[in-house]
């Protein structure tokens, strides 16, 4: 009864809408299945899936509007004039919204990634339409938090260099330890060589993501301006592994400090 009461144009629009939904769902499912079996990397799958979702929604919305609204192009022209007027008063918010779309479309970073936007480094908590919420970390040690939470306008992403540390599997890190100037230099050098070997072995054991091949471990001993011997350890790892490696080194050196009178750390 209800269907019979509907006008012919309305019936036609409803039929076309139902057909459009069915076709788009079918095509989207095929695309998702194709991505699932053809794209091997998990992170890459998420990027392609997100782009497909936005692409299908945009095309679907445009076709849906053409079905239900007459004089579609005249309405678009009106929206264009209205947008120009709004742009004058809401330029920054519009810029932030467009940047939000670009961040999601291009997958510049995801929630949980550690990034640097301009001079600000931190772990991304959320990505909103206007602002990005970041838990700030130290610029030289991106794995360690400063405790501050910062809201960045999305527009900063288009105006500043962006580094996503989470997509870079191997970063070079430098860790420094200061020893008493009376420490035995030859013994300290031998200990540093042994420490590097132990660090390599530990590095192999801390996870499947670890790739030792191509990574470099080195150390350097030099006289410090603070009247002591400075041990500088350099190695490559991901940010997730850095905290574990730093903890391993701290424990090893503290144990040596407590057990060997020739190797004494200076605590600042």
Image (spheres, rainbow, N blue to C red):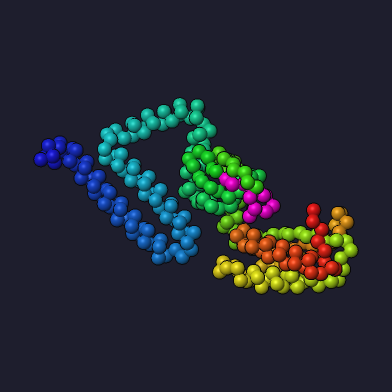
Q: Going by the picture, which residue comes out furthest to the front? A: 258
Report the residue at 58% width, 50% height from top. 123
Based on the displayed image, in which of its 4 quarters is residue 197 positioned?
A: bottom right
Query: Residue drawn at (64%, 63%), measured in percent from left and top?
Result: 244
The x and y percentages for residue 7 are 15, 36
Q: Residue at x 61, y 71 (%)?
A: 205
Whether residue 161 is visible to the viewer of this picture, yes or no, is no
Is residue 144 a member of the stretch shown in magenta? yes
As for residue 78 lying within the magenta part, the answer is: no
Q: Residue at x 53, y 52 (%)?
A: 112
Q: Which residues lie in the magenta part?
A: 134-145
In the image, taking residue 237 as reference, residue 183 lies left or right, namely right
| Residue 153 horizontal/vertical position (percent) | 55, 39
Q: Where is residue 242? Give x, y as percent.
A: 65, 60
- Residue 51, relative to residue 93: is it above or below? below
Q: Is residue 94 above or below residue 126?
A: above
**The N terminus sits in image quarter:** top left
């Amino acid at each position: 009864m209800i269907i019979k009461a509907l006008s012919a144009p309305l019936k036609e629009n409803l039929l076309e809408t139902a057909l459009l939904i069915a076709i788009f769902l079918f095509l989207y499912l095929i695309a998702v299945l194709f991505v699932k079996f053809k794209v091997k990397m998990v992170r890459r799958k998420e990027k392609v899936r997100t782009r497909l979702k936005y692409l299908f929604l945009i095309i679907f919305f445009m076709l849906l509007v053409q079905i239900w609204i007459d004089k579609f192009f005249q309405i678009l022209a009106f929206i264009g004039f209205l947008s120009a007027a709004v742009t004058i008063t809401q330029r920054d918010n519009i810029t932030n919204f467009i940047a939000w779309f670009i961040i999601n479309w291009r997958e510049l970073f995801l929630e949980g990634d550690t990034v640097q936007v301009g001079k600000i480094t931190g772990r991304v908590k959320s990505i909103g339409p206007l602002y990005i919420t970041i838990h700030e970390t130290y610029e030289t040690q991106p794995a360690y938090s400063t405790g501050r939470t910062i809201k960045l306008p999305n527009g900063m992403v288009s105006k500043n260099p962006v580094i996503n540390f989470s997509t870079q599997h191997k970063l070079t890190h430098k860790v420094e330890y200061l020893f008493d100037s009376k420490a035995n230099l030859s013994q300290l050098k031998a200990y540093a060589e042994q420490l590097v070997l132990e660090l390599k072995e530990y590095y192999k054991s801390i996870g499947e993501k670890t790739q030792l091949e191509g990574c470099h471990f080195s150390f350097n001993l030099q006289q410090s301006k603070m009247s002591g011997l400075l041990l500088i350890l350099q190695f490559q790892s991901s940010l997730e592994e850095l905290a574990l490696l730093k903890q391993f080194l701290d424990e090893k050196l503290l144990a040596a400090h407590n057990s060997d009178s020739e190797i004494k750390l200076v605590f600042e």
